[in-house]
């Protein structure tokens, strides 16, 4: 406070001016009560005795007392990524492009990519939010992929038998055409293990929609821009009894994952399934899309069992979920849900908040972050149109 600016003000105006600087109504009332004690006790106290410096001292004392007993705010609680100990996964061997022809690419680990159907959308650009205390550091705009989201096409499945080869090829071709027209994924792996590039790696694909993930340092929203989308031509396990993926698909997915992780230095913990990241803002529930809630072959792809990672949408943003699917013990994603619930409860207790109030605060945090992401995307679009 610049005391010279308040010199000569009438006592009542001086007190009102200082009180107006206090945003919290409880603190404001407490301040005024200190300045105007009951007349029967201290009749001789007058406001003119309290100069600006003393007024400031009274205000500081009240604020300090208020802070001691006040619970911490969830809006400033650290955004800590919860990652339980899992087996070490060595970095993938260096993978490089060996040969590039008109319709294909071959890599040093044996991966062959069919590039005949690749399309462009728009260059990727996204905001990454630090996992420190919200508001202390601004988000950072980035342009390189930091993770992989694995999907299933949930398309019609022909029995994987030699007698059905013609039908398998016909269905596979129609799936390629379908996802290409919708810019659905960066890569599609058909039933025979053939890898198709659908959307250029440099561009965003429409694969994740509303989604949330976090690693040890950063939080990501709407992963179309920040993560690469890889889809199996398959149905997720438990859907009509179909097998999720053929052995050929799994072998190809392992090589593709190895290549992408090598080139973009993608952490193993950022290779997750669609069911782990998908959210629905309209009802604040996670799992709007539920492909790969269970059965994803992490180990076969050279990855840790990332089903044991706590789901950030639940413990960082307070999303709810469908207990029938996400609490079911036969769904591997339920492990991450359980860990996220524990972290949510632990954080609420540490902040001295009731779970319902804490959830509301976290959900408002999501709304604020989502607005910032949308504003940033709009600004990027306007800049690109110039």
Image (tube, helix red, strand yellow):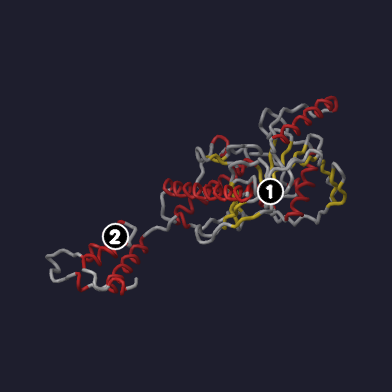
Kindly identify the residue that appears in the image at 35 percent across and 67 percent down.
64
Q: Name the residue beneath numbered marker 2.
A: 28
Relative to 107, say whether 69 is above or below: below
Relative to 295, say whether 142 is above or below: below
Residues packed near mark 2 inside 10 Å, few (<14), some (14 to 19) or many (20 plus): some
> Which element is circle 1 on?
loop
| Nearer to the camera, 340 or 12 | 12
* Image quarter of residue 189: top right
Residue 237 location in percent, x, y? 68, 34
| Nearer to the camera, 133 or 141 | 141
Picture disc at residue 172: none
Residue 139 location in percent, x, y? 57, 57
Q: Name the residue beneath numbered marker 1.
A: 123
Q: Quadrant of the N terminus?
A: bottom left
The answer to which of marks 2 and 1 sits earlier in the sequence is 2
Marker count (numbered): 2
């Amino acid at each position: 406070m610049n005391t010279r600016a308040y010199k000569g003000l009438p006592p009542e105006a001086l007190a009102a001016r200082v009180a107006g600087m206090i945003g919290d109504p409880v603190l404001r009332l407490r301040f005024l009560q200190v300045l105007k004690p009951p007349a029967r006790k201290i009749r001789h106290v007058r406001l003119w005795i309290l100069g600006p410096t003393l007024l400031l001292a009274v205000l500081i004392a009240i604020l300090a007392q208020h802070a001691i007993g006040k619970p911490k705010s969830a809006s400033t609680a650290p955004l800590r990524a919860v990652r339980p100990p899992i087996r070490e996964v060595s970095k993938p061997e260096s993978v490089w492009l060996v040969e590039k022809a008109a319709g294909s690419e071959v890599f040093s680990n044996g991966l062959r990519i069919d590039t005949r159907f690749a399309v462009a959308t728009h260059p990727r650009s996204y905001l990454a939010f630090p996992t420190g205390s919200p508001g202390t550091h601004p988000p950072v705009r980035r342009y390189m992929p930091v993770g992989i989201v694995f999907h299933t096409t949930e398309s019609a499945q022909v029995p994987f038998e030699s007698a059905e080869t013609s039908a398998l090829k016909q269905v596979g071709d129609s799936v390629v055409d379908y996802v290409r027209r919708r810019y659905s994924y960066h890569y599609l792996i058909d039933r025979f293990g053939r890898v198709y590039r659908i959307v250029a790696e440099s561009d965003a694909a429409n694969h994740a929609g509303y989604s949330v993930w976090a690693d040890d340092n950063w939080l990501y929203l709407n992963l179309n821009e920040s993560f690469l989308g890889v889809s199996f031509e398959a149905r997720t396990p438990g859907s009509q009894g179909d097998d999720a993926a053929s052995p050929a698909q799994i072998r190809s997915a392992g090589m593709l994952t190895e290549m992408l992780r090598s080139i973009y230095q993608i952490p193993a913990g950022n290779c997750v399934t669609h069911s782990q990241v998908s959210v629905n803002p309209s009802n604040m529930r996670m799992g709007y899309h539920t492909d790969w809630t269970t059965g994803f072959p992490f180990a076969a792809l050279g990855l840790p069992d990332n089903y044991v990672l706590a789901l950030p949408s639940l413990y960082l943003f307070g999303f709810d979920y469908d207990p029938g699917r996400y609490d079911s013990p036969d769904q591997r994603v339920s492990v991450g849900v359980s860990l996220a619930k524990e972290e949510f409860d632990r954080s609420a207790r540490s902040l001295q908040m009731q779970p319902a109030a804490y959830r509301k605060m976290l959900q408002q945090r999501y709304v604020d972050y989502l607005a910032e992401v949308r504003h940033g995307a709009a600004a990027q679009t306007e800049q690109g149109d110039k």
